[in-house]
Image: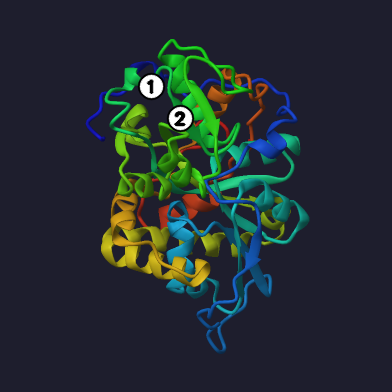
């Protein structure tokens, strides 16, 4: 619940600088976004056509990857409504959908996509594994959309979690790290690798978590939307919204990355995509009900079925769409992974290049956003 008192210990400064080393090998497979599985597919749905006679930018086609997930609403709506294509002019947009962060990072590194919408943990992992040479974060997309939901017959208060089995999507993923950090701040002990301790952390794929909940094999879950709202629709109770643990109730759940090669060779295309992103976010925030319907229509095209209202409506309300990448919170998430023993201290210097975004924002009369001291020097 939004009114649940936050855990003050989590409201720490996220701007500590991190020493230069690389991520543990574990995280090469463990750090994912909020998706389901790992496969990717090309989008063969009908696309807004490139306008006849429109001026082409410095490349014929730009390839963008994203998840068929509400936390990637900017990509869903911007693609569905043709807002990206409008800014790209005669340059065609080709999209691919991914269901996990590592596969999207692999596609970026292989040159199969140029730009991607992705979560913070795979962004950190991709950057550190390449020693700062593969990608840059160039913009924000979404904040929030993560909740702790529980069986109300077994758990009534946060203290009741002790001794219970709580699911997270995957060892070392964004929600897993957040839950481990919350447990630590409570003063409880859990072995990060095994998940055993004062709370049993059960790593469960989001697509099977509802069945695990119904069978009683888990007592709750710290999960992203729409899984959280699906569990609530099936009898769970929301006990905590992770946003309440962060300054200003905001933390990065989705940002925009680009391959450094593409950013260097095609800055005009990157800037056009960012214009499309900023205009899409404005459209979403100005008319959220219409945008919600657009996102759900996109999901229906991509997955074969829309989300029902009892899941869509609460899930949509818990996600904040933003241009700001909330860089300080990504830094904090990395620190939480280090504290949990899942990550060696990474050097995140240079992970952000917000110059193109700030140029777009300035042209639109909007305030610039910060890289929290982790930008390109």
- Residue at the left extreme? 3
- Residue at the top extreme? 187
Q: Give residue 177's position: percent from left, percent from top.
A: 53, 28
Secondary structure beneath label 1: helix
- Residue on which the image places disc 2: 166
Q: Residue at x 52, y 73 (%)?
A: 85
Q: Residue at x 61, y 51 (%)?
A: 37
Q: Nearer the viewer, residue 185 or 280?
A: 185
Quarter-of-image position of residue 108: bottom right
Q: Indicate the quadrant containing the N terminus: top left, top right, bottom left or bottom right.
A: top left
**Residue 190 visible here:** yes
Secondary structure beneath label 2: strand
Q: Residues within 10 Å of mark 1 (few under 14, many from 20)?
A: some
- Residue at the front extreme? 215
- Residue on which the image places disc 1: 161
Q: Give residue 168's position: percent from left, percent from top.
A: 50, 35
Q: Residue at x 33, y 54 (%)?
A: 311
Q: Nearer the viewer, residue 295 or 198?
A: 198
Question: Do the CB atoms of the residues marked 2 and 1 lie less than 8 Å apart?
Answer: yes
Q: Point out the tag, 2 or 1, that comes first from the N-terminus.
A: 1
Q: Nearer the viewer, residue 220 or 270?
A: 220
Q: Residues within 10 Å of mark 2 (few under 14, many from 20)?
A: many
Q: Nearer the viewer, residue 60 or 71?
A: 71
Quarter-of-image position of residue 152: top left
Q: Residue at x 41, y 50 (%)?
A: 226
Q: Indicate the quadrant containing the C terminus: top left, top right, bottom left or bottom right.
A: top right
Q: Is residue 146 above or below residue 7?
A: below
Q: Count every numbered label the image shows and give the total.
A: 2
């Amino acid at each position: 619940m939004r009114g649940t008192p936050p855990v003050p210990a989590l409201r720490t400064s996220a701007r500590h600088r991190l020493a230069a080393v690389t991520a543990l090998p574990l995280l090469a497979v463990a750090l994912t976004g909020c998706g389901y599985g790992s496969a990717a597919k090309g989008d063969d749905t009908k696309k807004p056509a490139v306008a006849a006679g429109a001026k082409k930018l410095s490349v014929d086609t730009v390839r963008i990857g994203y998840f068929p997930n509400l936390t990637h609403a900017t990509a869903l709506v911007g693609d569905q409504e043709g807002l990206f294509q409008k800014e790209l002019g005669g340059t065609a947009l080709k999209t691919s959908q991914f269901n996990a962060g590592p596969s999207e990072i692999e596609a970026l590194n292989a040159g199969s996509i140029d730009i991607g919408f992705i979560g913070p943990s795979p962004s950190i992992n991709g950057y550190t594994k390449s020693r700062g040479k593969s990608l840059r974060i160039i913009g924000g997309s979404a904040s929030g959309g993560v909740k702790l939901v529980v069986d109300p017959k077994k758990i009534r208060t946060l203290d009741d979690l002790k001794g219970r089995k709580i699911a997270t999507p995957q060892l070392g993923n964004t929600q897993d790290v957040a839950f481990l950090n919350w447990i630590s701040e409570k003063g409880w002990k859990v072995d990060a690798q095994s998940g055993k301790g004062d709370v049993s952390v059960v790593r469960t794929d989001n697509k099977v978590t509802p069945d695990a909940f119904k069978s009683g094999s888990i007592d709750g879950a710290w999960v992203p939307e729409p899984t959280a709202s699906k569990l609530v629709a099936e009898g769970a109770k929301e006990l905590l919204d992770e946003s309440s643990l962060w300054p200003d109730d905001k933390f990065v759940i989705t940002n925009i990355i680009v391959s450094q090669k593409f950013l260097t060779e095609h800055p005009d295309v990157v800037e056009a995509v960012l214009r499309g992103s900023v205009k899409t976010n404005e459209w979403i925030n100005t008319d959220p009900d219409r945008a919600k319907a657009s996102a759900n229509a996109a999901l229906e095209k991509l997955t074969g079925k829309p989300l029902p209202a009892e899941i869509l409506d609460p899930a949509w309300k818990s996600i904040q769409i933003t241009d700001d990448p909330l860089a300080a919170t990504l830094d904090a998430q990395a620190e939480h992974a280090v504290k949990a023993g899942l990550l060696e201290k990474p050097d995140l210097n240079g992970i952000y290049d917000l110059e193109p975004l700030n140029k777009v924002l300035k042209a639109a009369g909007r305030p610039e956003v910060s890289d929290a001291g982790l930008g390109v020097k």
